[in-house]
Amino acid sequence: MTVQTPVNSLRSQPDETGHFGQFGGRYVAETLMPLILDLEAEYRRAQEDPAFHAEMDDLLKTFVGRPTPLYPAPRLTEHFRKLAPEGKGPKIYLKREDLNHTGAHKINNCVGQILLAMRMGKTKIIAETGAGQHGVATATVAARFGLPCTIFMGAKDVERQKPNVFRMKLLGAEVLPVTSGAETLKDAMNEALRHWVANVHDTFYIIGTAAGPHPYPELVRDFQSVIGIETKAQMLEVEGRLPDMVVACVGGGSNAIGMFHPFLDDPEVAMVGIEAAGYGVETGKHAASLTGGRPGILHGNKTYLLQDEDGQITEAHSISAGLDYPGLGPEHSWLHENGRVKYVPITDDQAMEAFQLCCALEGIIPALETAHALAALPELTAQMDADKLLVINLSGRGDKDIFTVADALGFDL
Amino acid sequence: MTTRFETTFAKGPALVCFITGGDGDTAANLDALVAGGADVIELGMPFTDPMADGPVIQQANLRALAKGVRTADIFRIAADFRQRHPTVPLVLMGYANPMTIRGPEWFAQECAAAGVDGVICVDIPAEEDATLGPALREQGVSLIRLATPTTDTARLPAVLAGSSGFLYYVSVAGVTGKQQAAQGSIEDAVARLKAASNVPVAVGFGVRTPEQAAAIAKVADGVVVGSALVELVAKHGEDAPAALQAYTAQLSQAVHAAR
C-alpha cells in the first residue's frame, strides 16, 4: 500500500507554485526565473532517484557523522525541576547537532545542495554567510567535491568573525567582504544574488537557510528534516513514545523547520520556535520578525519581515550573528499564522545566561543561536509536568562565539 | 483611447531615461531630461535592498532614503511631473515590497491618481503576477515586464501575458550599470522578441554612450539609459540639471537619428 499524505496534513506544503498559504513564492528577477524552474525540476528528479538518496545517506553517515545522539541532559533536567513548582519540570533531551562535522546542522543542507549542483552540471559554488557557519559548511562540501567556492560575507561580519573567515580560506574558499548597506547578512545575501544573476550559466547558489525563492525553502527543509526524523526514531526507541514538546531557535529557521516538520502531523507534540529579541522587542533593536514584524517580500519570498510602513527593510540586531537577519523562512510565517508552532522572543541577556548554564551543567558549549532556545527553558519547564518529555535542538557548538561571549562578560582574551 | 506610450513609440525609436526618485532635486532633474529630449521617464522608487542594481543605483537608493524620502514623496514627484508634462509617459520602477506593502490596490490607485502610465517591478516575475498585475490592470496602469537573455522562446508568452506599454529587454544577465552586451546579441534578441509580441521593445542595462544608443535604436523601439544619468546626479548634486540636459541631448540625438 502506498503511504499518502492526508489531505488535511500540515506536511504537504508548499503548493505546486511554491506557496505556503500566502507565504513563500518566487519573487526573483526574470534572469533567475528559468534557473529556479530548472532547479525545481532537477530536485524532483533527485527525489525520485534512489542513487541520490543513497549518496546523500552515505555522506551524512561517513562525512558528516550522522546520526547525531539524542542526549538526556540530567543536570539541566534536575536544575529546572528544582526551580519549577511541585510536580513540574519535564525530562530534557538535547539533539546534538553540534556534533556534526563543522559543528552545526548547516552541513546537512550543504551536502544535499552540492549534490544537486553537480547533477545540474554547475561548476562554481556561491553562498552567503553571517556568522560564518554556513560559509564554513559550504566551503567544506566545495572542498570535498573539488568545486571553486566564493562566500559573500558582510564586511562587519568579516571583522567580527575572523576565525571562521580563516577556516573558509583554509578550505579553499574565496571570502568576499560586502561593503554595501549595513555590511551584515542581509547585504551579503543581496550581493550573492547580484553575483548569481550575472553568472547563472555556471554557478549554483547554496542558500543557507529555509528561505529564498521556491524551491529553496522546501529543499532546505527536506535536507534538514533528518534532524526531526532521527529525533522521532530515537525518542521512540528510548522512551517508547513521542516527545511532548520540541524547541528550536529560529533565525532563517532551517534547524527549527528540520526538527519540526516531521512532527507537524503529530498533534500531541507541541512546538516552540525561539526568535532573537536582541535588547528587547520593545527597544526596536531585535531580530524577532514574527513578534515585531509583518508580512512582506524580500530575497525571493513573501514572509514576515522587519520593516517600516513604506516597506523599507529595517536593520536587525542580535548578539548572535546567525540570528541577525530581518526575516525568516516562509514556512515559519505560515506555521505562526495557523498556530501550529508558537514563537517566543528571547533577549541577548537571557541567551547569555543560558549559554553559561549549559556550559556549567552539561559540559556543552552551545552556539549563541542555540543558547536562545535553551533560554526558553525556565518558562517552558515551569508549566510542564515532570513526566513529560522536552527536546531542545542543540543546533550548533559555541566555539565560534567565545570572543563575543568573553566581550559580553568583560573578559579580555 | 490612445495611450501616452502608443503616441510616443509611434514616432519611432524612443529614449527612455531613468533616475532615482528623491536623489537630488528630482523635479528639476526630470525637467532637464525632458528638455534634453527624453521620450519616456522611468522614476526609480528607492528601496533598502535593491538586489538587481549595481553600485551606482544602489548608492542613489541609499542617498534618497538617507534624506528621508518616503513613498508619498515619490507619488508627489510623479503627480507634479504629470502636471508639468501632460504627454510624456511616466514609469515607476522598483521592488515588490514598497509597491505591495499597503496592498496592490492602494499602489495601483496611487499610480493612476498621480498619472503614472506604467510600472516595472524587478522582483515580481510572471509566476507571481497575482501579487500586483491584476490591481494595475484594473486601474489601467501598464505592467511592463522584463525579458532577459535567459528568457527562452518557450517562456516568452508567459512573460508577455498581462503586460502592456512596452517590453523591457534586459540585455545582459547581471545588475544595472555594469557590463554591456554585444550589439549582435541585442539584435538577435530584439528580433526574437518582436516576432513574439506586438508591444514596443526597449533595451536597457549597461547602455551608457550615444554610440551604443544609436546602434540599439537601429533595431529596437526604445533605448533605456539609467546608471550613466544617475552618476551625473551623484557627481553634480544641485547642479545636475545642466549636466543631465546636455548628456540627454546627445543621447536623444543619437536615438532619434534612427527615426
Image (spheres, coloured by chain):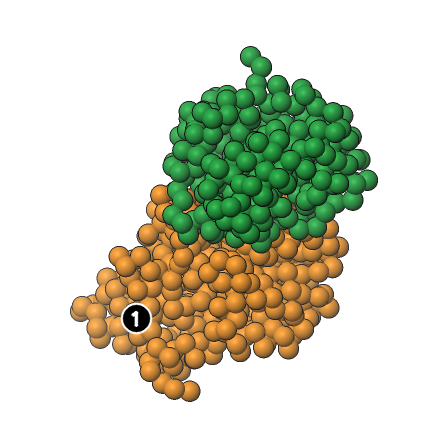
Q: Position of residue A67 (x, y in %)?
A: 54, 69
Q: Position of residue B229 (x, y in %)?
A: 59, 44
Chain A shown in which color?
orange
Q: Position of residue B216 (x, y in %)?
A: 75, 35
Residue type beneath disc 1: Asp
Q: Is A341 left, or right, of B168 in this rendering?
A: left
Q: Is A76 left, or right, of B35 in this rendering?
A: left
Q: Chain of mark 1?
A: A
> Which residue does the image show at 44% across and 67% down from the upper left?
A321
From the image, tell me which residue sits under label 1.
A349
Q: Is residue A358 visible?
A: no
> Which residue does the image show at 67% across and 19% down from the upper left?
B10
Image quadrant of residue A203? bottom right
Image quadrant of residue A176? bottom right
Count up the numbered dots: 1
Q: Secondary structure at mark 1?
A: helix
